[in-house]
Image: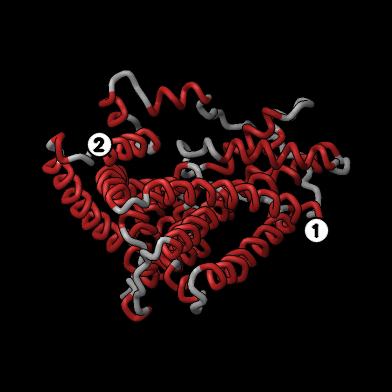
Amino acid sequence: MKIWMRLLAGSVIGVLLGMYLPDAGGDTREFFRISSEIALSVGRYAIFPLVLFSLAAGTYELRSERKLLRVYLKTIGLVVVTGAALIVLGTGAVLVFSPARIPPIFQEAPAFDLPTVLETVFQVFPRNMFAMFADAGVHLAPLYVLAVILGLLFAGEQFGTEPVAAFFDSAGRLMYRLNSLVTEVIAIGFIAFGARLIFDMRQVAEFEIFAPLILVLVILILALVLVVYPLLIYFFGGRRNPYIWLYAMLAPGLAGFFSADAFLSLGVLTRAGRENIGVPRMIGSTVFPLFAIMGKAGTGLVAAAAFIVVLQSYTALEITLAQAVWVMTTTFGISLLLGPVPGSGVLVALGMLSNAHAGGMEEAFVMVQPIIPLLVALGVFLDVMTAGFAAHLIAHSEELRAKIDPLEFI
């Protein structure tokens, strides 16, 4: 059975359990919460060593092929372009369609914070390099930078680095096999993911007040994934049937939505990128982790759209052009810093936007807190699809993408 079928089957079973099992005073919900945390740990298990070894080997390969600078410029360019474009689309959509205002909701706001630019620098370059291996499993950027540096240092026969480069190459292949094993068995965890999402939505007392915002977001995201991305892939990715790409992305898309976690999705995306889309290691190891760290276009779209609705609801006034521009630019800046929060990017972005906005709005984002699990799921889903879209275009532009028969997709 193909991976996407397993993930879909697990998710559907979980959704049905979430719909029909009794809450039992919160015990059932707590059971699926704990189960989903266990599944999340399993799904992330191989990600950090996979990124370290594969990216170092991939960087060495890119440099050997004299493609390093071009690939990184294209990747960073697509991170910026997709992030800015999707945030503008999300903001414009809610301004045009004007979802109904949300009445004030009084509850305690969660405490969180993003690292400052200086703190991020110290995370990437700690005084003791080994300290980056002892964090809580959320800081992927330090490993990414280390892997790139090592990959660059492997070049040069006079330094005798060939044995180390060969070791990283072999270790990268081994970690890819381990990641493949994880993707084979993780489907059972999607039962917990699906059930937890439904149980979270069952706690929303008045779901109908959020329905207009959710409807606008779902329609916009589906339009991007089903129409805009396939059209762009058709015109810039070889003029082949673009819906083959969509079929190739079924497993990563399901992983992004139901796990709502960028790092777990990264494992599924890495495998689907190579074995479905035909993205070679030198491209996939560069593009996919960087999008997991910085390429939060989907999260930015959802956060910007939700904050516009919060702003309209909080002030009961029409949004001015200056306010819309502020929301878009601030959301874009925040989206680049969301790497350390792979499973709560929308919530953190909304909190940071509320804190940054003048007028005593520090806790205004709690208006949409009841539907945060769904908003996060939508954001991660679009993040993952955007990463797959970018990798396809970059691999094709470098003439490195292998053509794989859809019958052979995982």
Query: How crowded is the residue under tag 1: few (<14 C-alpha within 10 Å), some, or many (20+)?
Result: few
**Residue at horizontal 41 percent and vertical 54 percent from the top:** 265
Indicate the position of residue 350 as horizontal and vertical percent values: 64, 38
Secondary structure under badge 1? Answer: helix
- Please tell me the numbered disc located at residue 153: 2
Nearest the viewer among 219 and 383 is 383
Q: Is residue 261 visible?
A: yes
Q: Residue furthest right?
A: 317
**Residue at horizontal 50 percent and vertical 79 percent from the top:** 241
The residue beneath circle 1 is 97
**Residue at horizontal 27 percent and vertical 50 percent from the top:** 64
Q: Disc 1 residue type?
A: Phe
140 relative to 396, above or below: above
Q: Earlier in the sequence, mark 2 or mark 1?
A: 1
Among the 4 quarters of the image, the one containing residue 141: top left
Q: With 31 as the anchor, is 171 left or right in this view?
A: left
Inter-mark Cα distance, 2 to 1: 52 Å
Give the total of numbered labels: 2
Query: How crowded is the residue under tag 2: few (<14 C-alpha within 10 Å), some, or many (20+)?
Result: some
Is the residue under label 1 in contact with that under label 2 (CB below 8 Å)?
no
* The N terminus - image quarter: bottom left
Secondary structure under badge 2? Answer: helix
Q: With 231 as the anchor, is 258 left or right in this view?
A: left
**Residue at horizontal 27 percent and vertical 55 percent from the top:** 179
Q: Disc 2 residue type?
A: Leu
Indicate the position of residue 133 as horizontal and vertical percent values: 28, 31
Indicate the position of residue 368 as horizontal and vertical percent values: 67, 44
* The C terminus - image quarter: bottom left
Q: Nearer the viewer, mark 2 or mark 1?
A: 2
